[in-house]
Amino acid sequence: MASHELKTPVTIFSAFAQLLLTDEPLAGKAQPNGLLSRMNAQITKLTNLINDLLDLSKIEGNKLQYHFNYFDFNKMVQDVVDEMRLTTSGHTIDVKLVKSSNVVYGDRDRLIQVVANLLSNAIKYPGNSDNVKVSSTQNKQYVTVSVQDFGIGISKEKQHKISSRFFRVSGVEEDTYPGLGLGLYISNEIIKHHNGTIPVKCDKGKGSTFSIRLPLRKNDK
Ligand code: ADP
């Protein structure tokens, strides 16, 4: 599965490159700018897959490094959403975050990776819906940010497996979406390292809510 996922963007990339190199005029086939931007999208996809595989090998070797600092969790979530809005068309992302500041002690870049993973999954498995809701709640000890979609959902029997390495739900709908089944495994490892959890609520055919629950106070990691 991994080699198929890695080869596909390379094959598409090389087909587009050949089209651009051809002596025949491109008219009727595609415009160079369009081809270049699709090539760029394939490079991004490939880079993400390679990064996931590198993270996996670091996790397995207990070598994933963390750089802990204090930072504003709300602001980070809002930044990830803004960035995602730039690269996704056809989806609305509604955001409702708690107003109070919520400083978290953690690795900002790694937590960005987790929020981006949950958001991109919410966008990737959409069913008939194009709406994603991002919200947060907070008490004295924890901040919880939730990413809710109204897409294909996940059946009760499969839910406990989704954070396993390389696990992907298979089925007619699910098989149409690319992926390695590593994002949630890596996200879970990162959140565990922050003494947090990723609660999941899914309903097959109705949608999914993935949350990140993190302690607000400094921990000893
Ligand atoms: P992938 O790269 O395959 O998306 P993940 O580890 O992020 O890997 O997710 C594991 C599996 O969990 C996915 O293959 C998919 O079957 C299921 N899944 C994750 N998020 C969602 C979601 N928001 N809606 C439906 N299914 C999901």
Image (cartoon, rainbow, N blue to C red):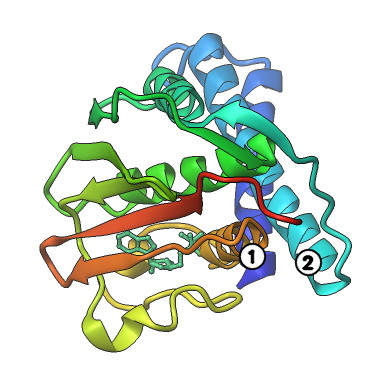
Residue sitting at 57 percent across and 38 percent down? 104
Left/right of residue 149 with respect to residue 146 in the rendered view: left
In the image, residue 183 above or below residue 148 = below
Whether tag 1 and tag 2 are in contact, CB under 8 A, the answer is yes
Residue sitting nearer the eye, 39 or 123:
123
Q: Is residue 196 left or right of residue 120?
A: right
Residue at 58% across, 75% down: 166
Q: Quadrant of residue 87?
A: top left
Q: Quadrant of residue 220?
A: bottom right
Q: Nearer the viewer, residue 64 or 140?
A: 140
Q: Nearer the viewer, residue 134 or 149?
A: 134
Instruction: Name the one closer to the observer, 167 or 213.
Output: 213
Q: Is mark 2 within 8 Å of ligand 1?
A: no
Q: Which quarter of the rendered picture does the C terminus lie within?
A: bottom right
Describe the element under mark 1 as helix, strand or loop.
helix
Q: Is residue 139 above or below residue 56?
A: above
Residue 81 seen anywhere in this rendered image of the structure: yes
* Above/below status of 59 relative to 122: below
Residue 13 placement (x, y as % from top left)? 65, 37
Q: Position of residue 202 (x, y in %)?
A: 22, 68
The numbered disc on residue 189 is: 1
| Residue 59, label in figure | 2
Indicate the amino acid at tag 1: Glu
| Residue 15 is at least partly visible in this image | no
Q: Position of residue 174 (x, y in %)?
A: 32, 67
